[in-house]
Amino acid sequence: HLELEKELASFMGTEAGIIYSYDVSTVSSVIPAFLKRGDLVVRDEAVNYAVLSGLDLSRAFVKEFRHNDMADLERILELVAEADRKKPPKVLNRRFIVVEGLYQNTGMICPLPRVVALANKFKFR
C-alpha cells in the first residue's frame, strides 16, 4: 500500500499521498488536520459520526444549523457577523461551514450552491 501511495502522489504531481483503508478514519483524521483550537465551524446537524468525531478532535468551536435548512444557516452566520460587529475578535479565527454532499444519515442531497453562496457572503470557508 505504501507503493500505491507513492505512485498516486507521482501521478497527481504531489510530494506525498496517503490512502486510508477505512472511510470513517479518513474524515475523522483529515478534519482535525485542517482545523485547530479557536476555529469556528458551523455544521449541519445531520453530519455523520466520522465528521462529528473529527470536529471533536479538532477542538474548534462548533455551532449547528437545522438539517439542510439554509434559512437557519444564514441566521446563524448573521448572528456570528453581528457578534463580530459588536465585539471584534482579538485574534482572527478561521471559519468553516461543514456539510455532506449526500448525507449518510438521511440520504438527502445538500444544496451546495446555496451553501457556497452563504459561505462567500459571510467570508466562511
Image (cartoon, rainbow, N blue to C red):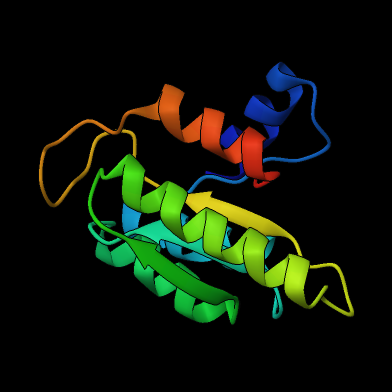
- In this view, the residue in front, 32 or 124, is 124
Horizontal side, residue 43 vs residue 78: left or right: left
Q: How far across and down, in percent of the image, does residue 47 sit? A: 29, 56
Q: Residue at x 43, y 28 (%)?
A: 114
Does residue 22 lie above or below 85 as drawn?
Answer: above
Does residue 21 appear in this view?
no
Horizontal side, residue 65 vs residue 105: left or right: right
Does residue 115 lie above or below 52 as drawn?
Answer: above
Q: How far across and down, in percent of the image, does residue 42 sit? A: 48, 60
- In this view, the residue in front, 45 or 122, is 122
Question: Residue 24, located in which quarter of the rendered image?
Answer: bottom left
Horizontal side, residue 87 vs residue 43: left or right: right
Question: Residue 71, located in which quarter of the rendered image?
Answer: top left
Q: Residue at x 18, y 46 (%)?
A: 104
Q: Residue at x 27, y 66 (%)?
A: 49
Does residue 83 lie above or below 48 as drawn?
Answer: below
Q: How far across and down, in percent of the image, does residue 56 sit? A: 46, 79
Does residue 73 appear in this view?
yes
Question: Residue 96, located in which quarter of the rendered image?
Answer: bottom right
Which image quarter holds the C terminus? top right
